[in-house]
Image (cartoon, rainbow, N blue to C red):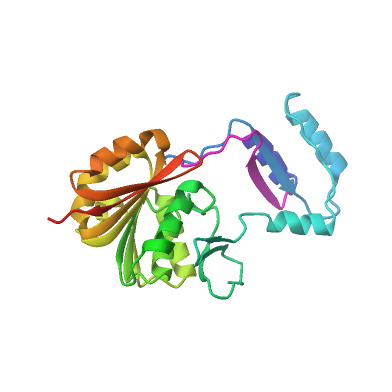
Amino acid sequence: MPRAEALLELAGAESLSLGDAADDPILEPAPNETPLWPAVELSALFAEGANLDALRAVLAGACESAHAFALGALDEDAWRAAAQRGIPPRRFGTRIWLAPANDPAIPAGLIGVRLHMGLAFGTGEHPTTALCLEWLDAELEPGARVLDYGCGSGVLALAALALGAERAWAVDNDDQALIATRANAQLNRREAQLFVVAPEALPPLRVDVVLANILAGPLIALAPMFARQVVPGGRVVLSGILARQAASVAAAYEPWFERIATCERDSWTRLDAARRPE
């Protein structure tokens, strides 16, 4: 793949993009990693008038017989559609409108959150994120202090602020996630309310809501810390949990939390609970 990318760049490609060629989704890469799919589709766009015959000869000599390629011209409408393809704006719950950074329209009566799509995990497309956004829409109290642990793109913290949270902290151990969250905070003009830090830089906090859309294992390990951070009567909202893991995660939180509830979608579970009185 690097060889093909280099050849296409040398041939004058104006843009390159990589895509999943065999329906093998990557839902949450490890920190500071950018993995590829087992089967990858590489697409390149060239300016009008590019010498496709010469490019065909170069690719035929460079690609193994098992790797197919196709060349063709895009008409203006197809090019425009390809340039605009991406994650469409969507509503979550009754109020949240999540849209790409360059989408200017927010429907009347909705609360907009814009994202630089693709910079980090958390675009609302996956059920784990959607379940958290829907909880925020239905349950978040105005003026709440919120911790988004494992923030990815910062979407949950930004949605909380848009819905009336007083301030939020966004934490992730992936440098790219922190960069993306800061960029999205600036995009939404929330820099003064959103504090973006790595886990080791997180100060002692007492918050009303902890949101953690990560994985079951880390959620279990973090239960004592979240219990210290959530005020009595406050809420913890956990996602990234497979349905078969929900009971184990709930058991880890029962010493400190009550009224544990679950919501399932597409084999994923969201768990929320209230902090017991101290």
x and y percentages locating residue 101 in the rendered image: 56, 65
Looking at the image, residue 149 sits to the left or right of residue 180; the answer is left
x and y percentages locating residue 150 in the rendered image: 37, 50
Can I make out residue 205 in this image?
no
| Labels in figure, total | 0
* Most foreground residue, 179 or 8: 179
- Tell me the quarter of the image containing the C terminus: bottom left
* Most foreground residue, 258 or 67: 258
Q: Residue at x 32, y 69 (%)?
A: 167
Looking at the image, residue 113 sits to the left or right of residue 60; the answer is left
Instruction: Please say if 229 is above or below 214.
Output: below
Residue at the top extreme? 65
Residue at the left extreme? 278
Can I make out residue 16 in this image?
yes
Q: Residue at x 73, y 49 (%)?
A: 13
Q: Main secondary structure of the magenta part?
A: loop
* Most foreground residue, 179 or 148: 148
Q: Is residue 14 magenta?
A: yes
Q: Residue at x 71, y 44 (%)?
A: 43
Q: Residue at x 22, y 43 (%)?
A: 254
Magenta highlight range: 12-28
Residue 229 found in image quarter: bottom left
Residue 7 found in image quarter: top right
- Tell me the quarter of the image containing the N terminus: top right
x and y percentages locating residue 226 in the rendered image: 24, 50
Residue at the bottom extreme? 108
Q: Is residue 270 magenta?
A: no
x and y percentages locating residue 275 in the rendered image: 22, 54
